[in-house]
Amino acid sequence: MSFFDGLTPAGPPPEVPDEILELGPYAPAGDEEFAPSQWFVPAQLPQLAEAGAGPAARIVLTGWDVWPRSVTMRLSVFLRRIRPGGRTSPYGRPGGGGLRCGLLLADGRKVTTLDGGSWPASGQSGPVLRLSGGTGGAFHHQLELHLSQMPPAGPTQLVVEWPDEQVPDTVTVFDAGPLRAVVREVREVWPETAPPGTAPPAGTAADGPLAAGPSADGEARGFLVAGLGPAEILARPPAVWSPPVPEPAVWTPPAPDPARAGWEGMADAHWRDTALVLERLAHGADPAARAPGSPEAPLHAAAAHGSPEAVAALLAAGAAADAPDHQGCTPLWHAVCHGARENAALLLRAGADAWRPQLGGRSPGRLALTTPLAPLFAGLPGAVPLTPAERAAQREADERAAVFAGVPTESLSAAFVAGVGEEEAVRRLGRDPRDCPVLPPDAAAEPWEGDAFAHEEAHRQVGVTGVPGGCVLVQPYSYLLSTEPLLDALSPGGAAYGVYFNPKGGTFGTLSRDGRTERTEEIGLPPYGDEPEGHWLYRFWSWDRPEEMYGASELAYACAQAGLRLADPQPLSGAPRRWVLIPDGSPLL
């Protein structure tokens, strides 16, 4: 009769494994590079001490696991704030600014988590301190740091530093003598497997390499090591066997078969491979034929992405310089949109029409006159210079966009409100300005003390900053500021434009004027021909914008649509003047 009778379902007998592994006897070693947890239950020594602290981080020493010849230190890491991005660990894979830990032993030896492994080829000797396990995530992590040798008795210093979290170099002094004293309490699980005469006195070191127990077939078995999430907190030591191989700056898809008599498999990057293009032509590829499913002829793709040699080869093979694509755009249009000067010059010499109206009634030449390609087009027959008003409008748009260069935009929503001051905006969000005080200049850019990624909290939190002529509202992790009810509530007596940078794709904007939504749109897209003038002025058509201007141009467009002009990105890149929590149940939500 069993206590558990009737609680487990009947089933077929378990399958017999092909191989049965048997744990061999513990082989003592001078260096226990891994905790011998298969053979021993460690003695546990509690020790509670704050080992380091920063504005939003605390590191606490909570105790030790003591093994026959080594110790494992337990640290608890507490965080009050997690940086943007929604990762389950606070900082992804840190560089040199991650958490560093070290010990200065009583005999003067120094060991840290940045020392690397004690592989034989490294020539290292002495103890090693490494992350051996841990649990937790988000705002609390428990780290286990294993010291491969028993520390000598006497004053020992634990040193902790975490530059990323502004935790300074902090020293905690303790006596390692009690660690050695509790070795006698370590319990061996399988004492009957110990070979006669091999177990040295407890608390002493034995010479020889670390060895795992042999299996039944006499073959040595190593330790089973699981993935360590807490490793994402610790700064990584340098590699001891070889330097890391750098990833290519730009990923290039595998080159397709050059012997094909067509353009199958050609990605944008392949048009830079002149030899590949020449091979395809030599095998009979038609310079005017489109690849299956492609909306463009080969010359369009080469003009935008390819080498000048590839463009010249296609022209020499008979490709039409002014062939239209599915939107009626010529290769010259694509070259201008991608800032490909040499390709544009080749097409012009081949007779391409610089002034043929294409999308939105614009020609490649008119676009080029607003770019560094202007000298290539300004002297061509039929050129009409930009008017002073056109030049001024483009210059103003570029200056507006430059203000927001480099502002992080992923997951951001922002609203630019003209004609409404900071305190009035707070009232229109449903709160009394007296309950939303102005924050000190050194306030955090994010308001949360709890879970920064709780959807409801993020959805209701709005940062508000007054600017000349109005105010700017921000939300780091919600789309609310681009919605019609909220913008219509903000815009009476003025105008409001809200924009949301969806991390899953697309940038969406809404314009409200005097309490009524006038337009919703997706912005930042290549043109289709029916866009408002602002899409052209803010260069959404250009694939040649510097990386820091993607997002900056969209913010500048949104700001201009509301009728504001900012000279400082601080309302978006820094902490707002006030944080407002929209009341629960508000019709704005």
Image: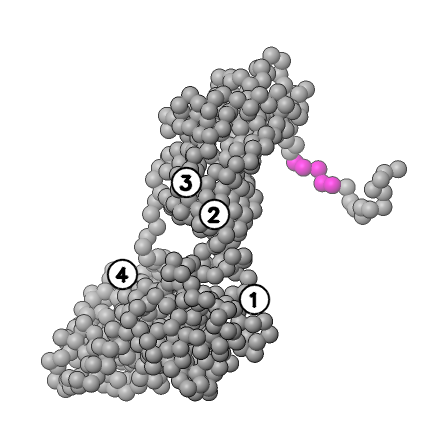
- Residue bearing the label numbered 1: 456
Task: State the separation of the CA atoms marked 4 and 2.
Answer: 51 Å
Residue under label 4:
273
What span is colored magenta in the figure?
A: 14-18
Outermost residue toward the front? 434
The type of residue carrying mark 1 is Glu
Within 10 Å of disc 1 (Cα), the crowding (few <14, some 14-19, many 20+) is: few
Q: Earlier in the sequence, mark 4 or mark 2?
A: 2
In the depicted view, which residue is nearer to us: 237 or 267?
A: 237
Figure check: 448 above or below 59: below
Q: Which mark is residue 57?
A: 2
Quadrant location of residue 199? top right
For the residues carrying marks 4 and 3, which lies nearer the camera in this image? 3
Gap between marks 1 and 3 measured at Cα: 35 Å
Residue located beneath label 3 in the image: 161
Instruction: State how far apart marks 4 and 3 are (Cα).
Output: 49 Å
Give amino acid for label 2: Ala
Mark 2 or 1, nearer chain start? 2
Is residue 508 something that shows in the picture? no
Q: Quadrant of residue 234?
A: top left
Q: Nearer the viewer, mark 4 or mark 2?
A: 2
